[in-house]
Amino acid sequence: NIVKDKTGHIIYACEIPNSESGDWFVALNHYFDKNGKTFAFEKQTNEFNSGCEEITYETKTEYYNNDFKSIGSEYKLVDKKKKELRKKDCDLMEYKYKVVSNNDNYLKTKSIKKAHTIYRESSSEFIENKTETDSKPNTNPKDVNLNVKNYISACIEIVDDFSPYSKLGYVNIFNTIFDNNPNIVNKNLLKQQLSAVLTNKEQRDLFFKGHLKFFGRNESSLFMNIDSMNDYTNTQFNGDKLVRYILENY
């Protein structure tokens, strides 16, 4: 989801279900320095009761630094808000009420300054403020990968849900962006962008291990059959196989 705050900055919140229980909702906000490097995370979880028919939820917001170490948390209980959910909605965890904690005050007390990674339409050049894009004419052809790059800049940190509870998987993130339409994105360019992270063993190891730690998981708890996203088996999660699949298909 792409949301603008009152200053016009874009805030990215990546929403995924949690594979451990199947009935958790996770929202991630990333905080970037002026060079586009992530220096803090905000993880928000909402707990649902079982059944996906009626839900009540509570929210806990946790904050992490770039070493995935917790730097604090907030907790809020919400009651008397329920919504009937059709069974088919359970996978996507769609619901009417969303909780937004007062993050600005917390971040100010912790001396964390918000900044966001945003790319120009005409190139891959990093800019800190989106208003700069609007104030300068775009003389170059539109970058067909703009949405992909901005999405990845916020969401590449995530190891997504590989459980039978949801049809959402890491590969499906890209299917969602492309809408299964090869004309939406330049796949060769995207492959080049992904290669920088996914084919570099050191970066890839940090990518997977860091985020397994971030979500409190370990390698043995992630299962995935990458050959068929709809056929969930107890195939051991294989980072190299996932990398090959993404590079070969996108």
Image (spheres, helix red, strand yellow):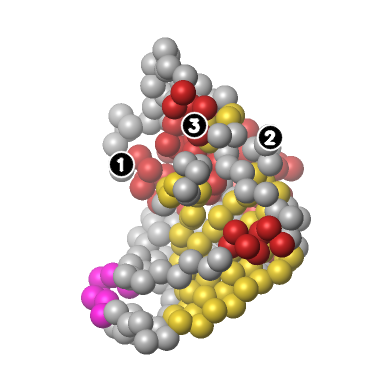
Q: Residue furthest top?
A: 139
**Vertical order, 54 against 225 (above or below):** below
**Vertical order, 155 against 96 (above or below):** above
Q: Residues within 10 Å of mark 3 (few under 14, many from 20)?
A: few
Q: Amino acid at mark 3?
A: Thr
Would you name the residue on which mark 1 appears? 180
Q: Is residue 176 left or right of residue 133?
A: left
Give the Cα distance between marks 1 and 3: 31 Å
Q: Is residue 114 visible?
A: yes
- Looking at the picture, tell me which residue is in the foreground, 51 or 39: 39
Residue 214: quadrant of the picture:
bottom right
Q: Do the residues under discs 1 and 2 have CB atoms within 8 angstroms?
A: no
Give the Cα distance between marks 2 and 3: 17 Å
Would you name the residue on which mark 2 appears? 35
Would you name the residue on which mark 3 appears? 131
Residue at x 50%, y 22% (from the top left corner):
123
Q: Amino acid at mark 2?
A: Asn
Residue at x 71%, y 62% (from the top left corner):
109
Give the secondary structure at mark 3: helix
Residue at x 40%, y 83% (from the top left corner):
56
Question: What's drawn in magenta, residue-wise?
Answer: 84-90
**Vertical order, 249 against 240 (above or below):** above
